[in-house]
Image (spheres, rainbow, N blue to C red):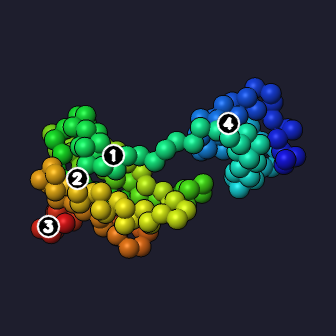
């Protein structure tokens, strides 16, 4: 175990373990980093402390299952959003814990905005998240009778043009 763990107050240790047990990795890293940053702990060291807690708690960690990607489940999530679905969009995002992943979103009109439908991470032995997101997104878009857009389907790019931007140029994404 990293020596940093011993510097945490008992209350913070309990909060971190509670987050780890609920598979809330980013919240756990944030707690460790905020508590120990004044002592010189860097973000990567905080991630290592939390990774060690995952290993220590082992089978007790409730790993969240992947978001459902079948059309009925995605359509139900879309129907629960507070607006009319104008398009389905896949966008890249990333962080230091999960690396690159894809968010599947419903682009909303009236009121304008967007709603989260699913998050797709790299899974060992599974298809890449961009391919899975494209397949699920197209299927949902076809079901809803709206366009599907993925600004950068082959290369992670969190600054790729979004559907509203592409639509503004007259493109049919």
Asked whether the residues under the numbered discs 3 and 4 touch, taking CB atoms below 8 Å apart as contact, a structural biologist would say no
**In the drawing, does residue 4 fall left or right of residue 139?**
right
**Could you tell me which residue is drawn at 82 percent across and 41 percent down?**
5
Residue denoted by label 3: 172
Find residue 101 and name its label.
Answer: none
Dot 3 or dot 4, earlier in sequence? 4
Mark 1 to mark 4: distance in Å? 28 Å
User: Which quadrant of the structure image shows residue 164?
Assistant: bottom left
Residue 16 position in % (x across, y down): 69, 35
User: Which quadrant of the structure image shows residue 138?
Assistant: bottom left
Visible residue check, residue 102: yes
Residue denoted by label 1: 117
Asked whether the residues under the numbered discs 2 and 1 touch, taking CB atoms below 8 Å apart as contact, a structural biologist would say yes
Q: Nearer the viewer, mark 1 or mark 4?
A: 4
Asked whether the residues under the numbered discs 3 and 1 touch, taking CB atoms below 8 Å apart as contact, a structural biologist would say no
Residue 73 position in % (x across, y down): 29, 42
């Amino acid at each position: 175990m990293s020596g940093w763990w011993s510097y945490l107050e008992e209350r913070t240790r309990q909060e971190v373990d509670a987050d780890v047990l609920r598979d809330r990795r980013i919240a756990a890293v944030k707690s460790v980093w905020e508590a120990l940053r004044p002592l010189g702990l860097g973000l990567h060291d905080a991630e290592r402390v939390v990774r060690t807690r995952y290993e220590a708690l082992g089978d007790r960690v409730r790993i969240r299952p992947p978001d459902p990607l079948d059309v009925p489940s995605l359509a139900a999530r879309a129907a629960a959003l507070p607006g009319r679905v104008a398009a389905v969009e896949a966008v890249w995002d990333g962080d230091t814990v999960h690396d690159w992943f894809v968010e599947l979103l419903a682009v909303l009109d009236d009121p304008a905005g967007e709603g989260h439908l699913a998050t797709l991470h790299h899974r060992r032995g599974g298809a890449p998240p961009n391919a899975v997101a494209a397949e699920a997104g197209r299927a949902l878009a076809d079901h809803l009778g709206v366009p599907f857009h993925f600004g950068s389907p082959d290369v992670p790019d969190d600054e790729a043009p979004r559907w509203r931007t592409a639509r503004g140029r007259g493109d049919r994404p």
